[in-house]
Amino acid sequence: MIAELGHYALILGFCFAILLSTIPLVGAWMGDRVWMRLSRPLAGGQFILVLGSFCALSLNFLLDDFSVQYVAGNSNSLLPWYYKISAVWGGHEGSLLLWALILTGWTAAVAKFSKSLPLDMVARVLGVMGLVNIGFMLFILMTSNPFLRYLPSSPQDGADLNPLLQDFGLIVHPPMLYMGYVGFSVAFAFAVAALLGGRLDAAWARWSRPWTTVAWSFQTLGIALGSWWAYYELGWGGWWFWDPVENASLMPWLAGTALMHSLAVTEKRGVFKSWTVLLAIFTFSLSLLGTFLVRSGILTSVHAFASDPERGSFVLALLIVTIGGSLLLYALRAPVVKSHIGFSERSREIFLLLNNILLMVATLTVLGGTMFPLIAEYAGYEVSVGAPYFNLMFGFLAPVLVLIMGVGIYSHWKDTPAGTLLRKVPPLAVISLPLALVVPWLMGSFEWMVVVGMFIAVWLTVATALDVWAKSASRKGRLQGWLKTSRSYKGMVLGHLGLAVTIVGATLVSHYTVEKDVRMAPGTVAEVAGYQFKFLSVGRKQGPNYVGDKADIQILDGDGDVVTTLHPEKRRYVVSDNVMTEAGISPGLLRDLYVSLGEPVGEQAWAVRLQYKPFVRWLWLGAILMTWGGLLAVADRRYRMLRKASSEKHSVDIQAQENRSATGVTAGGAE
């Protein structure tokens, strides 16, 4: 009965999505305020119904209802309860229901927190989001129903959750990543709504910007969690592999970063309107493309869901309709989005434009490298595009982008004297180059790519620090001056510093990782990067749904002092008979010591991989700083004040237009 209730709730949610996508849009077209006001309760009702459906599926997992096919395929009675909850989105059907839940949640959030927006804009935005909701709910109901039952008989126990997914990473990574993926639908909806209303002024960018920043922040954190999960769970200590599904999450992040900066220009100066609309469409389209890559079955990845071609065809059709429809609307409404405000070649606008161009080149680089092998395979050729291609391209694009960011910090809106900008370059170079040269010397091996990476990281850090020093000048001290700066400025500072920290981590761990594969038995010692790894013992371990071997490996530093004892494991999950490696990791701010068990190679002897990974934690520390910066920028009260002011102006304009229409005084009549 619980499964049937969940199914019915999803069907009712689909009906609400149909109403949400029609009544408010028609009301906005007809000017009927009663119909437009229905958008908010419809959005709220849709979210409650989908939430009820999701809770019903979760309850089926907790109660071990193996008569439900999806539960039987992704759970087991021995599975710990917390993994039963995360198993809800551990397979194709449940992850799509999570996507629908988050999508309706974003829709309800826009309805809740948009009371200061004009009613016609809210109706159009929620109506567009309702259209997107229809596509995904129809996908679930037609091809991916998670509530189907085994009839007339059902298995006594489930097939178990994929051991790779029996981890804390699964609990947090997919929801965070989906919050970013799906959150970009809000920017898409605002752009389409603005096209429909013909009001692509600074106001729509101001309304859309906080939602885009929140989505970008979730996407940043989601990617970082995925990188961290891959690092410790896959067993070989990697953090990014340019896997097609990893690329699928990176592409909307790059485009979303460009969109955030472009929205800032449109809001401040009223330019780049056409470009910003296209970016909003492109960013959400890349989110849909990622869904297609994961669920179409056209690629093999540890991240991908095994799906049949019918599902891939449905997502492809949804992608074509979304992109095609929005671009057609853009073409029809293009005359209303022309920018009439010019800008200087030394203004902040030009630096943000260059930022956008480079980010989009990077996005297209990833897109081409990801899609080209798939297209070639379809044409009958076998082509491989791997890490060397991506590393080469980003090794060129990233330094140029960061150098421009460092100088662009000092630019102003409208115009900045060229001398002001040129005077900033020598101090940045003088500080950055020596520090960049010192790091390889300290690490014991000189590599030019390390110099480049450290140079741009220090360049961005110093540029940001000098700008903070200048802007925090105050009679009461620089601390008071810094505290008085706006939250959006503090967010920008954290975002830029986070990027610099991530660059340091990526540069050093990529070039100075030390790895050694050795044969170890109790009593043997191996040395890596000045640390001694002593194999103490190995014994059996019994888990809730697995059995395994657990080793005890003691680590000593150069002075012979004990650093820690790690316990890497080799597990065999009894239901699925899958074997998994659980690494032992000694984390640190400056280095990680990483140990993983291979296969037994004799009595009490094992193949063991030992790794020294410098500054790897800086990858995720930088992502946390960027996420924090994005959320801090959204918390700026300036957004609330500006939204309210623009809403009042918008209402006054509408009222004036209605008054002119009522008296017959139009632009044409006046002439």
Image: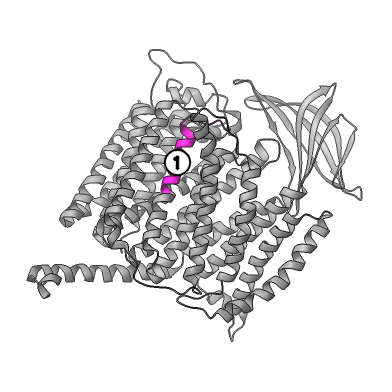
Name the element at disc 1: helix
Q: Nearer the viewer, residue 10 or 227?
A: 227
Based on the displayed image, in which of its 4 quarters is residue 570 positioned?
top right
- The stretch drawn in magenta includes residue 437: no
| Residue 379, percent from left and from top | 49, 30
* Colouring scheme applied when the structure was drawn: one colour
Report the residue that reaches farthest toward the top. 152
| Residue 520, percent from left and from top | 85, 31
Residue at the image position 47 percent from the left and 62 percent from the top = 261
Residue at the image position 84 percent from the left and 47 percent from the top = 529
In this rendering, position of residue 3 left or right of residue 498: left
| Residue 5, percent from left and from top | 33, 30
Vertical comparison of 74 with 202: above or below: above
In this rendering, position of residue 632 left or right of residue 29: right
In this rendering, position of residue 52 left or right of residue 456: left
Three-letter amino acid code of the residue under disc 1: Leu
Residue 473 visible? The answer is yes
Q: Magenta region: which residues?
A: 284-300
| Residue 291, percent from left and from top | 45, 38
Point out the image quarter for the C terminus: bottom left
Point out the image quarter for the N terminus: top left
The crowding category of the residue bearing disc 1, from other C-alpha atoms within 10 Å (few below 14, some 14 to 19, many at least 20), is: many
